[in-house]
Amino acid sequence: MTKAPSVKPLQFNRPQLRFILSKLASAVSLWSRATGKSTLIAWLIHLIVTKMPRSCWGIVGSTYGQILTRTLPSTIDALERLGYFKDVHYFIGRKPPAAWNWPEPFQRPVKYDHFIIFYTGAGFHLISQDGNGSSSRGLNLDGWIADEGLLLDRDKLGTDVIASNRGNKGVWPDTPLHHGRFIFSSMPWGDQGKWLLEDSAYYDRDGNPFSATRDAMIKLQLEFVDSRSMKTRLKLYEEILSLSAKLCFYPNPKKLKKEGKEVPRGLLYSEANIFDNLVNLGIPYLEEQRRELSDFVFLIEILNQRPKSVEAGFYPRLAAHHAEECPNLAYIEGLDFHLGKLKVQDSRMDGDCRSHLPIRGAVDWGSKISTLTTAQIHEDVREYRFLKGLYVKHPKLINDLADQYAKHYEHHIKREFHFIEDTEWGNARKPDADLTYNQQFAGRLGTHGWRVRHFNQGRIPSYQRRYQVAHELLGEEDPRQLKIRFNKVQCKDVLTALSLAPIRQDSRGEIAKDKSSEKKLTIPGQEATHFTDTVDLHFISIDQHVGRSQVNPHGLIMVTS
């Protein structure tokens, strides 16, 4: 006998209730981590399925990999909490059994490969801007939903998705959701995603600016987290609640046109942070995030603060195009959206990891944290690909890092590791050890069946020279050099560390890297400069061992040192 699913009452937090109860036609929701965006996307899908049968919507992401690995798994999980089960109430990537006699959308797709179909005939195209999912060109959509909106290319969004939001006029006349656009995102920082903030312009027009109140509230929230006095926290929480009550988000009552941009009537712009969901998460989770994240990341991704600016640091030429999402779509799709299997992360999910090529790696050994970055040379596309950043924290050390590497790459065919050694520090050893750190690491990889080749860097160049090498490689001005590319997902901590690495002048007036973040307790090791030193080793290795290629007059590739 099949066990009946457990039924629990739905409990929505304040921002979710505001969204649900508002008579909105569209929304831009800039909410921090752990505020319930996935639940709200699932609720929105529920409304569309029940109130707009046979409608056809788009679920939009910057890449198809993002949709498959981040948007859909959390949405599937949230739909289950609402009582919708995959292969029962909806199907992904295929039609339902013909015998079930489900209706189809008015604008049904020719193929269901990148489509979700529900039992009411409502459906959702999986639309990605990288071209790997469904294309919105030629579609007649009844609305669209975007997750991680800060990653979207606004120009592509306008010419493709927004232009397609035009289907079935006159159908569902009493449903304000028809032709809506719903964007969910964390707070943008830097230049990427700034356009999302423009939809808040109607609050200033209405004489209801909220930025000062929001900033004052975030300041108190940070004091609350950092305080260890219960009495102080209670007092601060009362002040936080008072300011929170003054933050009033509501749908735009009248269409606004400003500087060639338009905020449509009925659009709800709102912001929220982790304090809005504290009743579900608890204070220990909040304190854990404070310990694990740097000040900068905590303020933006947890407290949802709008960053003023990001100053150029030791890697000023690091730009958005250097980081790419590289999922192995064929492998991921083969898992058939099985949540348990999707949670098992290894190199088979990495589309940029070529199993027939050796892996290059550089390590930074430390007393508190040890870091490893892996990479490959993709000669056919002239790219040096950073694949993944791995780390272990004290008391774990050498063997643990090697085991973590071996676990992630256990399905790799060519088990050859090119060890880019920092001989200056890597040849140190514990007083009671016979082997150096580097020797022990190489030996441990050997027990997992890996053959290790050593690339000796000699004495590591000065920071001035490292800065120059990084400037040259990231600048991509020399066509003979390999282009530097990072896996945006697997190298997230590496990219954060590079973006935040400060610059200073040493006593001789030369450029140096500010390493003070490694000593600050408020900055977690994976976001301090440890990872950046391993990237420096890769860059120096490219300069010394990989060389430059140039085309000779006869069309042959010649290698010069």
Image: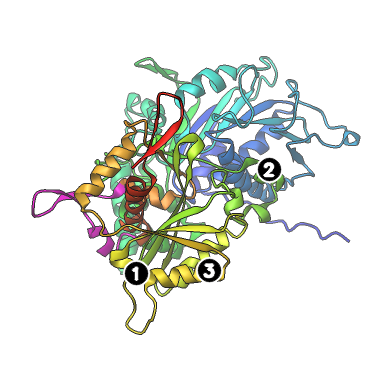
Q: Which mark is residue 44?
A: none
Q: Secondary structure at mark 3?
A: helix
Q: Amino acid at mark 1?
A: Lys
| Mark 1, residue position | 368
Q: Nearer the viewer, mark 3 or mark 2?
A: 3
Left or right of residue 475, residue 321 in this image: right
Q: N-terminal of the two: label 3 or label 1?
A: 1
Do the numbered discs 3 and 1 sit on residues whose CB atoms are within 8 Å? Answer: no
Q: CA distance from mark 3 to mark 1?
A: 25 Å
Left or right of residue 155, residue 235 in this image: left
> Which quadrant holds the C terminus?
top left
Q: Amino acid at mark 2?
A: Glu
Image point 79% across, 44% down: which residue?
Answer: 88
| Mark 2, residue position | 333
Query: Picture coordinates of residue 462 (x, y %)?
Result: 20, 53
Image vertical order of residue 493 relative to residue 399, above or below: above
Which range is magenta?
500-524
Q: Is residue 177 visible?
A: no
Q: Is residue 515 magenta?
A: yes
Q: Residues within 10 Å of mark 1 (few under 14, many from 20)?
A: some
Q: Amino acid at mark 3?
A: Gly
Do the numbered discs 3 and 2 sit on residues whose CB atoms are within 8 Å? Answer: no
Q: Which mark is residue 446?
A: 3
**Residue lying farthest to the right in this orientation:** 99
Query: Picture coordinates of residue 262 (x, y %)?
Result: 43, 19
Query: Picture coordinates of residue 356 (x, y %)?
Result: 59, 49
Image point 62% across, 43% down: which residue?
Answer: 72
**Residue lying farthest to the left in this orientation:** 508
